[in-house]
Amino acid sequence: MSASPLTPLDYIAEGYWQDFLVGRPIAGGIAYETELRAYTLDESLESLQRIDTLLSQVRRDMIKSGIWDETTLLVDERYRNFMVFLAFYAGRVLAQQWQSKPHWYGQFELRKRYPKLTLITDDFYQHMAVGYDNDSVVKEHLFFALEPIGLRLFGHIDRQFNAVQGGQVESGLYQAVSLRLPTILSKDVHLVSELTADKVATNKATTHKATTHQVTDSGNPSADSNMYVSTSQSSELLEKLEEVSIGAEHNQANAVVTDSESRAIQSAMPDTVTELQASIVSVESENPVRPELTKVTNPTAKPTSSVKNTSTPEMFTQLLVELDEIAVPQPTGDVQYHQARKVLDQFEQHIAKQNKPRRQVIFSNDHNTAKNKALLTLQAAAEDGNTTAMLRLAMYELLGEGLTADSDNQKKSGVEWVNQAASKNDSRAQRILSKMYYQGVGVSQDIDSGKYWLEQAADNGHTEAANLVQQWQQAEMLLTTQKQEQHSTKRYQLLIGAIIAVALLIILII
C-alpha cells in the first residue's frame, strides 16, 4: 500500500463495505440493495459482469417508469449511495487484482497530488478516484470508477461522458476494470470481456470439421452448459426447433419429428426450447434464403443472409442484408451479437413465411420470453459499443417490438441507437438514418438531414449511398447548367431587344 495517509474516502469506502457485509443499513440508504445482495459480490472480476447486468436492468426500469432523469436521480441520496457503493466495490476488485489495497482520493486530494488533472468541481463523476497499485503516484494508475457507471446508466448520443484522463469512458465496470488489469491478467480475461454475467460462457473451441457434439456435466445439459454441435446436426436441430418452438410449417416431406429423433434432440439440448436457442453457437440454418439485392453490391464473396424479404418495411429488410454483407469491425460484443442473432433469425424466418403483416403474427408467451432474452443479449452488446447490435436492436425498437415499454419510447430508443451507431462512423447506420429522415420514420421529415447522413455514409464507403450521391451531384450539375443556359438565353434576348429598340429609334429620328 502507498505510504500516503488514509483519506476520509478510504474510511468511508471501508465503512460501506463492512456495513454491506454484515447487513447493516448504509447511512442515507442505498437503492437496489436487495438486488445487489442477490448478485453475489464476491470481489471477483465475474461479479462486475453481474453488476453491469444489474445496471442495465436499472436503466430499463427507470425508462419504463418514466424517471430516467440523471439530474433528478443524482439529487436522490439513495441513488447516489448506490453509485458510490459500486464505485468503491469496483476499486476494491481492481486493487485486489494488483495485489494492493485501494486508496481513495476526493477532489481536494486529487488536485493536490495530481495538479495536471483537469477536474470539474460540480461533476459528480469526477468527485473521487482510486489508486489501485502500490505506486499510486503514477497518474495512469488512477481509476475514476463513477464514470463507467454513469455511462452505463445515462449515456446516449446526446449525453456524452468525457473521461478525466482522456479517451472514451468504458460502458460498464467489467470492461473498465479489465482494461486496467496488470498485463498478464488482462490477456487472460480478454477472451471473455464481451460476455455479461447472465449469459452462457462460450469457449473458443477449435473449428475442425468434426461430426460429433459434446455436452458438459456428464450429459446433463443446462442453461450454463457449453454446447458444440456439428454443422449437419445443428441444421437438423434448427429445423426441428423451428417446427416445435415457433410453429413454422415445413414444406419438406420428412418434417415430422419421430420418437427416435425426439430422443436424440433432447439428449443434445437443454430442457426448454428457449435455452436451446441461446445455447447453439456459430450455426447457420439449412438452406437459408437471402433477400434479393437491388442496390448494394460488393465484389468480394458475401455470406448468405438467413432472412428473406417479408412484409417488414423495405428499409429494415435492406438493413438486415447490410448487417451481413457490409463488414464493420467491432471492438466488442461480437459473441453476444451472434448469440442473439441465432435466436432472432428463427423468428424472422417464421415471420417471412407468413402471408400477413408482422403485427398479425402471434407467438406464445414462451416464444416471446425467448425473444426478449435474445434482445437483452443484443442490448448488452450494443451497450458495450457494438454498432451491429445497436442497429439490429434499433430495428426492433422502431418496429414497436423492442424492450421499451410504450411505442413512443420505443421509437425514441430506436432513433438513439441508430444515432449512436452513426456517430461511430458505421456507414450502415448513416445510410438508414438518411432514409429515416427522408421518409420521416421515427423522426420528423428533414430533407437536409437526410442529405447530410447520405453524404456521410458515402464518405465512409457505403456503395449504394456513394452511387446515390454521385447521381444527385450529376443531377445538380445538369440543373445548374440548364439554369446558366436559360440565364444566357434571357440575356441574349434582352440584348437583341435592346438593339431592335435602338434601331427603331434611329429610324424614327431619321
Image (cartoon, rainbow, N blue to C red):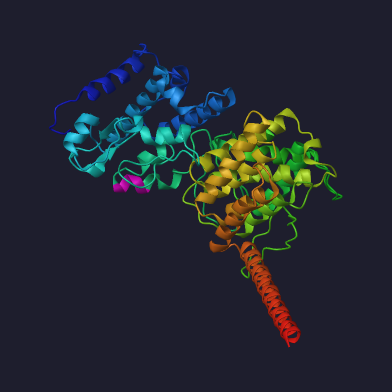
Q: Residue at x 27, y 33 (%)?
A: 130
Please, is residue 20 above or below residue 378 in the view?
A: above
Q: Is residue 333 magenta?
A: no
Q: What secondary structure predominates along the stretch shown in magenta?
A: helix
Q: Position of residue 66 (x, y in %)?
A: 57, 24
Stretch of the chain drawn in magenta: 183-187
Q: Residue furthest bottom?
A: 510
Locate the C terminus by quadrant: bottom right
Q: Is 114 left, or right, of 479 in this rendering?
A: left
Quadrant position of residue 301:
bottom right
Q: Is residue 106 at least partly visible in the picture?
A: no
* 442 vs 78: above or below: below
Residue 351 appears at what percent x and percent y? Answer: 77, 43
Where the N terminus falls, by quadrant? top left
In the image shown, does 228 or 72 lie closer to the viewer?
A: 72
What is the quadrant of residue 376 in the picture?
top right
Question: Which of the two residues, 92 or 412, is positioned nearer the viewer here?
Answer: 412
Residue 369, placed above or below residue 472? above
Q: How many marks?
A: 0
Depth check, front residue: 185 or 380: 380
Q: Quadrant of residue 170?
A: top left
Residue 27 visible in this rendered orientation of the protein: yes
The residue at the point 59 percent across, 62 percent down is: 462
Query: From the viewer's perspective, is 70 left or right of 288?
Result: left
Q: Is residue 19 left or right of residue 330?
A: left
Q: Position of residue 200 (x, y in %)?
A: 54, 38
Position of residue 28 measured from the top left corner of the image (x, y, whole percent) = 36, 13
Residue pushed farthest top? 24
Residue drawn at 32 percent across, 27 percent down = 88
